[in-house]
Amino acid sequence: MENLMSAEALKYISVALCTLPMAVVAWGITKFWMSLFDNIARNPQANKELSGYSMVGFATIEAIALYCLAIAVLMLL
């Protein structure tokens, strides 16, 4: 049987699949900030408490995107 795809083509396909979670991360960040602004608008007194928790949550969501990017770059090497 003939080889239909080269190793180089499979490498680029795998990198493309590795970067797909970044779209989910972008959706998550949007949903995160919308929820934060909604909660602050409903309860302005909780602004300081929510801001502290929000930075931890935002950093966690952003870390997922950075890990996906790092893996995609390593796959290209």
Image: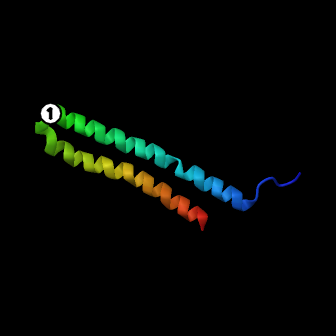
Question: In the rendered image of this protein, does residue 21 appear above or below residue 15?
Answer: above
Q: Position of residue 38 (x, y in %)?
A: 23, 34
Which residue is pictured at 10% across the width and 38% down the height?
A: 45
Coloring applied to the structure: rainbow
Q: 55 left or right of 65?
A: left
Looking at this view, name the residue that lies furthest to the left: 45
Which residue is outermost to the top? 42
Residue pushed farthest right? 1
Q: Secondary structure at mark 1?
A: loop
Q: Which residue is drawn at the image coordinates 53% and 47% (left, top)? A: 20
Task: Quadrant for residue 15, please give it.
Answer: bottom right
- Picture residue at 26% right of the left edge, 46% below the top: 54
Q: Which residue is mark 1?
A: 43
Residue 42 to residue 77: above or below: above
Give the mark count. Answer: 1
Pick the residue in front: 31 or 63: 31
Q: Is residue 6 left or right of residue 53?
A: right
Q: Position of residue 41 (x, y in %)?
A: 18, 34
At x 89% / y 51%, what residue is drawn?
1
Position of residue 18 measured from the top left corner of the image (x, y, whole percent): 56, 52
Question: In front: 48, or 13?
Answer: 13
Could you say which quadrant of the image residue 31 lies in? top left
Left or right placement of residue 22 versus residue 4 in this view: left
Q: What residue type is disc 1 on?
A: Asn
Image quadrant containing the C terminus: bottom right
Count residues near mark 1 (Cα–Cα under 10 Å), then give few for <14, some for 14-19, many for 20+.
Answer: few
